[in-house]
Image (cartoon, coloured by chain):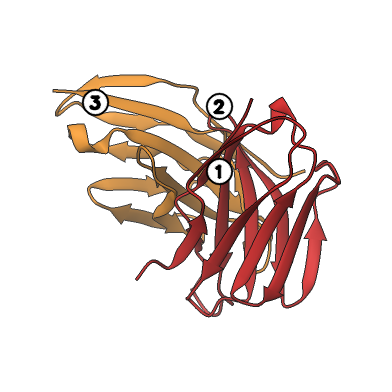
C-alpha cells in the first residue's frame, strides 16, 4: 500500500487552464503539506494543513488553493495556470510526534506539471 | 530566521569512493536535523536523523553527526555505489520541537559512475 499517493503523476496543459492535483494519505496523520520543487530541485513549502487549520505561505499566489475534504486528503487546485507554474508538486504528511519520534515527513511520488 | 546551507552539486564520484556532503545550519534553540534522499522519479524519503548534539544518525552505510559547536550535519559514506545516485537534502526542524515545519537545504545531486 502506498502511504502517500498523488494523482496525476504527469500533467501537461495550456496556459490559462485550471487544474487539480489530488493527494491521499493512509497513515492516519494529522498534518499534510504541499511542496513545489523547481527545475533546480529546490523545495519550497506552499501549504500546511493540520486538523482543519490551513496555514498558507504568503509567497504563494492566490491562484493556488488547497482543499481538504477530510483529514486523509489535501488537494491542490490551480487557476489560470502560468508558464512559471511548471514544476514537480509533492504532497507530504506527518504524524503527531511524541518522545523521540520527531514526526518524519512521508512524501508522495510527485506530480510533474508542465504548462505550455 | 532558521536556515540550512548545503554544498552545491552536482557531485560526481566513482564507485567505492568516499562521499562527504557538507551541511551547516543556522537556528535558535536546539533543532532536530535530517537527511532526506530523492531517487530519480521519486519523492523524498528520510535517510537518517539526529535529535540532539553529538547524536549520530546512520542508515544504509550513510552517517551524519550532529555537531553543535560547528553547527554542522555533514553526510558521509565510506564507499558509494551506483545505486546511491540521487539528490540529497539536509533539513532541520526548528527548536528541537516536534511541531515545526521542516526547513530544507537546496539539495545536492550525487552521480556515481561504475
Q: Gap in Å between the C-alphas at discs 3 and 1?
A: 31 Å
Q: Which mark is residue B112?
A: 3
Q: Residue B100: x, y in percent? A: 68, 62
Residues at discs 2 and 3 in contact (Cβ within 8 Å): no
Chain A rendering hue: red
Letter of the chain that mark 1 sits on in the rendering: B
* Quarter where residue B114 is shown: top left
Q: Residue A89: x, y in percent? A: 58, 45
| Circles 3 and 1 on the same chain | yes
**Most foreground residue, A93 or B47:** A93
Residue B29 seen in render? no
Q: Gap in Å between the C-alphas at discs 2 and 3?
A: 21 Å
Q: Is residue A110 left or right of residue B62?
A: right
Q: Residue B14: x, y in percent? A: 19, 21
Seen at 57% across and 56% down, the residue is A91
Q: Which mark is residue B69?
A: 1
**Most foreground residue, A87 or B34:** A87
Residue hosting label 2: A39
Determine crowd level at label 1: few under 14, some 14-19, many 20+ residues with C-alpha closer than 10 A: few
Letter of the chain that mark 2 sits on in the rendering: A
Determine crowd level at label 2: few under 14, some 14-19, many 20+ residues with C-alpha closer than 10 A: few
Seen at 31% across and 54% down, the residue is B58
Which chain is depicted orange? B
Amino acid at each position: 500500500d502506498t502511504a502517500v499517493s498523488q494523482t496525476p503523476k504527469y500533467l501537461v496543459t495550456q496556459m490559462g487552464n485550471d487544474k487539480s492535483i489530488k493527494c491521499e494519505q493512509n497513515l492516519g496523520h494529522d498534518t499534510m503539506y504541499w511542496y513545489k520543487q523547481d527545475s533546480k530541485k529546490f523545495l519550497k513549502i506552499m501549504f500546511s494543513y493540520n486538523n482543519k487549520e490551513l496555514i498558507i505561505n504568503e509567497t504563494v499566489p492566490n491562484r493556488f488553493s488547497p482543499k481538504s475534504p477530510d483529514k486523509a486528503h489535501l488537494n491542490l487546485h490551480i487557476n489560470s495556470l502560468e508558464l512559471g507554474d511548471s514544476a514537480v508538486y509533492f504532497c507530504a504528511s506527518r504524524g503527531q510526534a511524541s518522545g523521540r519520534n520527531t514526526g518524519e515527513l512521508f512524501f508522495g511520488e510527485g506530480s510533474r506539471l508542465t504548462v505550455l | 530566521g532558521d536556515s540550512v546551507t548545503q554544498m552545491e552539486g552536482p557531485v560526481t564520484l566513482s564507485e567505492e569512493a568516499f562521499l562527504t556532503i557538507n551541511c551547516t545550519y543556522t537556528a535558535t534553540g536546539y533543532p532536530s536535523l535530517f537527511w532526506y534522499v530523492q531517487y530519480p522519479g521519486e519523492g523524498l524519503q528520510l535517510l537518517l536523523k539526529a535529535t540532539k548534539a553529538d547524536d549520530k544518525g546512520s542508515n544504509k552505510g550513510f552517517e551524519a553527526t550532529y555537531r553543535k559547536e560547528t553547527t554542522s550535519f555533514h553526510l558521509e559514506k565510506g564507499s558509494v555505489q551506483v545505486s546511491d545516485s540521487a539528490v540529497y537534502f539536509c533539513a532541520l526542524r526548528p527548536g528541537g520541537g516536534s511541531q515545526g515545519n521542516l526547513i530544507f537545504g537546496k539539495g545536492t545531486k550525487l552521480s556515481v559512475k561504475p
